[in-house]
Amino acid sequence: FSDGQISVIYVLGGPGAGKGTQCANLVKDHGFIHLSAGDLLRAEQNRPGSKYGELIARYIKEGTIVPQEVTLALLEQSIKHEYAKGFKKFLVDGFPRKMDQAISFEEQIARSSFTLFFECPEQVMLKRLLERGKTSGRADDNIESIKKRFRTFVETSMPVVDYFEKQGKVVKVSCDKPVDEVYAQVKDALKDKGI
Ligand code: UP5
Ligand code: MG
């Protein structure tokens, strides 16, 4: 996609920061298409006949980043599918979370407008994920996997946020607050960007 053809906002933040929750709010009020890389990977994992099912399951349980080829292909396919239906505004949630993915997406698919970065203390995220784990059925909502996800976030994903921050393309939202208060900050951030 050439610049201006579609608009892409990355939504980044630690595991359990509330990315999915706030994206759902934005879909309701702003008509974005919400693409969660994690959701796309889980769907691919469960798709009968997928050759990546076992690989994805292994990476998710270990809280490590699935090789970029898989995730990029899923995102590209979804974006093209939605574009063909006339949709042009995308929230890309939980991606890019490794430098190689960031470079590839920007070069091969589309340049992002900016990144919404959800800041949240680890203890708060831990509490949310353990609570959700009681009913989510997610293979990575257990204490062992959560600790690994936190480590990957700090070591592998934060450099992506730093990279975009150096370009002046990161808007921070503090997420240790009730959902409505976080959403108010998100809306203000978008307003500042003219959205
Ligand atoms: N909640 C949310 N906001 C709240 C608030 N303000 N106050 C109180 N509670 C709040 O929220 C998590 C929980 O907290 C929910 O119960 C919610 O009600 C509550 P949610 O909105 O789901 O948070 P989110 O940030 O989306 O958390 P998620 O668990 O989805 O984050 P992850 O980034 O860990 O998960 P994701 O699905 O993106 O990735 C999973 C795995 O996929 C990764 O670990 C990795 O192995 C793999 N992956 C890749 O390999 N490559 C990719 O590019 C992407 C993912
Ligand atoms: Mg999510």
Image (cartoon, grey):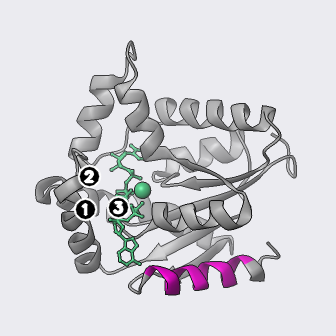
Q: Is residue 104 magenta?
A: no
Name the image quarter holding residue 2. Answer: top right
Label 2 belongs to which residue?
136
The amino acid on which the numbered mark 3 sits, given as a three-letter code, is: Phe
Q: Residues within 10 Å of mark 1 (few under 14, many from 20)?
A: some
Task: Indicate left or right for 123 with 107 as reference.
Answer: left
Label 3 belongs to which residue?
153
Identity of the residue drawn at 64% across and 62% down: 28
The label on residue 132 is: 1
| Label 2 C-beta lies within 8 Å of the nearest ligand 1 atom | yes
Where does residue 107 sit, x and y in percent of width and height? 70, 42
Quadrant of the image containing the N terminus: top right
- Relative to 120, is 138 above or below? above
Tell me which segment is drawn in magenta: 179-190
| Label 3 C-beta lies within 8 Å of the nearest ligand 1 atom | yes
| Label 1 C-beta lies within 8 Å of the nearest ligand 1 atom | yes
Q: Residues within 10 Å of mark 2 (few under 14, many from 20)?
A: few
Q: CA distance from mark 3 to mark 2?
A: 21 Å
Q: CA distance from mark 1 to mark 3?
A: 19 Å
Image marks 1 and 2: residues in contact by CB distance under 8 Å = yes
